[in-house]
Amino acid sequence: MVVFLLGSAFASPAYDLLKLRDAPSCASLGEATPALRDELLALTAPDVLPAAVPMRATLCLAERFPTDPVVEAAFVAWAGDSARPGEVLEVLNHEAQLREPTAALLVQAALAAPNARVRARAALVAEASLRPSVHVLAAKPAQ
């Protein structure tokens, strides 16, 4: 099933646009549908090349689908994945666009991430956040 999703993602219009050197805006990918969401999620796989495609797909997910439950679950799960530090850093940059409970879960998971850069960025995001449930994490040690 995963092979099929990746294979279809590589043949997709979103992949063709995101792999361009000067990729167009996320809005130009079309309507924010479940099909686009699933296509973008497939394109975030760490083995997708060129390497800019997973990062651009992550950016588009954060911009276009920040409150979608499927995307929220992926964002939080990525924090514990040692193969996805870049994706987590990108999502942390969009903490303010996420729903507050998701932002808190993401930052909490990122504070315990296997990657030191992700942990450091999560600490900065928690410290700067205007959201009480996220900001309170700045005072707590990672668990």
Image: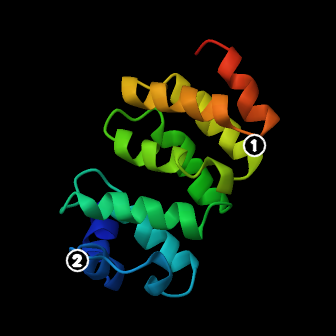
At 28% from the left edge and 50% from the top edge, which residue is drawn? Answer: 46
Which amino acid does the dot numbered 1 rest on?
Answer: Pro
Residue shown at 50% from the left, 81% from the top: 27
Q: Would you say the residues marked 1 and 2 are in contact, meaning their CB atoms lie under 8 Å apart?
A: no
Relative vertical location of residue 104 with respect to residue 52 in this rendering, above or below? above
Q: Earlier in the sequence, mark 1 or mark 2?
A: 2
Residue picked out by circle 1: 101
Instruction: Give the number of the mark in front: 1 or 2.
Output: 2
Q: Secondary structure at mark 1?
A: helix
Question: How crowded is the residue under tag 2: few (<14 C-alpha within 10 Å), some, or many (20+)?
Answer: few
Query: As displayed, is residue 78 above or below residue 56?
Result: above
**Residue 57 occupies quadrant:** bottom left
**What residue is at 45 percent from the left and 49 percent from the top?**
90
Q: Residues within 10 Å of mark 1 (few under 14, many from 20)?
A: few
Q: Amino acid at mark 2?
A: Leu
- Labels in figure, total: 2
- Farthest residue to the front: give it: 128
* Residue 132 in which image quadrant: top right
The circle drawn on residue 20 is: 2
* Residue 115 in view in this figure: no
Give the residue furthest to the right: 132
- Above/below status of 118 relative to 42: above
Instruction: Specify the quadrant that holds the N terminus.
Output: bottom left
Question: Mark 1 and mark 2: span between their CA atoms?
Answer: 35 Å
* Residue 88 spot, x, y in % from top left: 45, 43
Where is residue 8 drawn, in percent x and y?
Answer: 30, 76
In this rendering, would 35 be left or right of 87?
A: right
Point out residue 28 in the picture as x, y percentages from the top left corner: 45, 86
Residue 53: image location, x then y, percent = 29, 64
Taking the spot 51% from the left edge, 64% from the top edge, the residue there is: 61
| Image-based side of 120 in relation to 71, left or right | left
Q: Quadrant of the C terminus?
A: top right
